[in-house]
Image: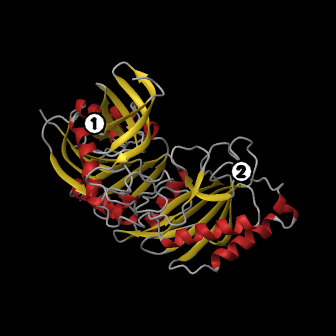
Amino acid sequence: MKKGEIYTGIVEKVDFPNKGILHIEDEKVVVKNVLPGQTVEVVVTKQKTGKCEARLLNVVSRAACETPERACVHAADCGGCSYQTLPYEEQLKLKEEQVKGLLDEVIRGEYQYDGIKASPLTSGYRNKMEFSFGDEVKDGPLALGMHKRGSFYDIVTVDQCLLVHEDCCRILRATLDYFKEKNVSFLKKTSHQGYLRHLLVRRGMRTGEILADLVTTTQTADSWAEKETEEELLEGWKQILLALPLSGSFAGILHTKNDSLADAVLNDGTDVLYGQDYFYEELLGLKFKITPFSFFQTNSLGAEVLYDTVRQYIGDTSGQKVFDLYSGTGTIAQILAPVAEHVTGVEIVEEAVEAARENAALNGLSNCDFIAGDVLKVLDTLEEQPDLIVLDPPRDGIHPKALPKIIRYGVDRMVYVSCKPTSLARDLIVLQAGGYRVERMALVDMFPFTGHVETVVLLEKKFQ
């Protein structure tokens, strides 16, 4: 096989999260964004001894389990979903096969596997979307949506996206039409010139409350500025949104400034154009105040399944002290607090810690403390001895130097919640070497039509 040449083969399996494996001319070929059983045409991009990397050119024939048509009209171009032609039950089977196979390679001994739990909703389940401004082709008309599959620059307008509530799609379309009519520019990644950057929309699944946040640069030297001020431009956008026929209602309409060079939604200051800079969501009988940039699980109903699983694995916490490490806005801590003696949450994002404190007060919980700081450093300052520990780290997992500190507490039980199985697998090796064994494991699908899945693991201390 040679770099640049085109080959055809059948996908044998897909390793987490999206690495398709096929063999062509007795060589292993890895290609992304494919499904098991597909016959695909690929072009070799990297060639090594015994292994090649390739890019998908065309699906010659679909797998037997695929549906004839994609569920979403944007699926051919948008890079947001990878399983649009796969029935939901088949998606669950594939995720289960990938994650369980990956973790079984590192888990020592037998454990109770509780299967994969489906998302209560498979469409319209996301309570948050970050849309980007750009153009679909170079120098084309303004677009607002998701990055085109495989492209750093091109944007696909996803005003019929199936992952979000229809209210979010209406807000996207109205926003795009308004700024397109005003001939407002977007920030170019190469020249760093332009005004529009992102549109952030959050909507409470239980409450129907909506936050819309327009993220722009501070650059107002544009053609539209010759006709009106920035204040007038934003006032017009606000009025357009307020006039929309939505099933939910706006809690706030915001304007965030961001002059960072990074292609990410960052906050250099936020102005409230309407209402307030937060909304409320409800989970498992508790109420949570959510700000534009605070972390909250993107699938509210799926989060209830996830946190209920965590609660089952933890068991009775009566009279016990709990550490909730990487606590975010304190959701897990507050679910455990009503029956625990005390819960200490540790989270590096200060805004999330403030939200956790407010939410605890909102729910009448006085036995929760939340500390802002890096888990690695905060553990050196805590004098309290926990009875059990909950771990819910970001995608990269737990800092290698923090794991020994966690193990030294010697608690009888730990529950590890992971959004990236490869990070979990790495950390489980260390935790098992430190004297813990995996007792139970379950998968919770929070992200239908994508390759992502949550994993919940119960670890117990081995006693000699």
Q: Quadrant of the C terminus?
A: top left
Q: How many marks?
A: 2
Pointer 1 and pointer 2: residues touching (CB < 8 Å)? no
Q: Residues within 10 Å of mark 2 (few under 14, many from 20)?
A: few
Three-letter amino acid code of the residue under disc 2? Asp
Picture coordinates of residue 117 (x, y %)? 25, 58
Closer-to-camera residue (78/371)? 78
| SS class, disc 2 | loop
Q: State which tag comes first along the sequence, 1 or 2.
A: 2
| SS class, disc 1 | helix
| Residue in the picture at 41% in, 35% down | 399
443 on left or right of 187:
left
Q: Residues within 10 Å of mark 1 (few under 14, many from 20)?
A: many
Picture coordinates of residue 69 (x, y %)? 38, 61
Residue named by callout 2: 139
Residue named by callout 1: 428
Closer-to-camera residue (257/44)? 44
Q: Quadrant of the N terminus?
A: top left
Picture coordinates of residue 197 (x, y %)? 66, 54
Measured along the vertical axis of the image, is residue 1 above or below residue 109? above
| Residue in the picture at 45% in, 28% down | 5
| Residue in the picture at 58% in, 43% down | 152
Closer-to-camera residue (89/247)? 89
